[in-house]
Amino acid sequence: MIDKSLLKAAIDEELANTDGFLVGLNITPDNRITVEIDSPTGVDIDECVRLTRAIESRFDRDADDYELEVGSAGLTAPFRVRGQYEKNVGNDVALLTADGRKLYGRLLSVGDGEGMDFPFTVAVEEKVKEPGRKRPVIVERELTFRPADVKSISYDIKFK
């Protein structure tokens, strides 16, 4: 079986001179390897092919008998690494809070922190009933969370 830490180190080395970053790495017991990457500028097929060839040049298929799949992180998949948060600053997001609220808003900022312990701020619109008014008004509020405070956050696709 391929050593996951050696594979991760090889992938990190290959992505070091690019704007890409590793989102997910999975190796099953029968040596099926799935690598998910992302980038602020997006991931094209050429980048996936380049990374596939780099991995294949370092890990002998005959010796390890593995199946390899390299692809981009899904557009609607939940964010799993800090780079995905940073990439989506300014974009619409959907998040499910730890207490079960579903919120839609715009990711405003990502703060400093170690690993997955950092604050991020989302602007959400809420309907508020103001005294003396017949109809509620829409107010934008900025809410700050940490990844541990939400069950999931993902890019919110809207078709107009």
Image (cartoon, helix red, strand yellow):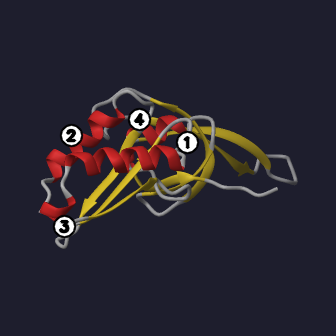
Q: Regarding mark 4 in the picture, which secondary structure is present there?
A: loop
Q: Regarding mark 2 in the picture, which secondary structure is present there?
A: helix
Identified by mark 4, the residue type is Pro
Using the image, determine if residue 105 lies above or below residue 103: above
Q: Regarding mark 3 in the picture, which secondary structure is present there?
A: loop
Whole-percent x and y of residue 80? 38, 50
Q: In the displayed orientation, state which residue is furthest to the bottom.
A: 30
Q: Residue at x 84, y 46 (%)?
A: 132
Q: In the displayed orientation, state which residue is furthest to the front.
A: 62
CA gap, disc 1 to disc 4?
24 Å
Q: Which residue is mark 2?
A: 9
Q: Which residue is mark 1?
A: 42
Q: Which mark is residue 119?
A: 4
Q: Which residue is mark 3?
A: 65
Whole-percent x and y of residue 152? 45, 57
Left or right of residue 79, residue 104 in this image:
right
Q: In the displayed orientation, state which residue is furthest to the right.
A: 134
Q: Residue at x 82, y 56 (%)?
A: 160
Q: Which of the two marks, 1 or 3, is nearer to us in this view?
A: 3
CA gap, disc 1 to disc 3?
30 Å
Out of 64 and 37, give the one closest to the viewer. 64
CA gap, disc 2 to disc 3?
20 Å
CA gap, disc 2 to disc 4?
27 Å
Left or right of residue 144, residue 32 in this image:
left
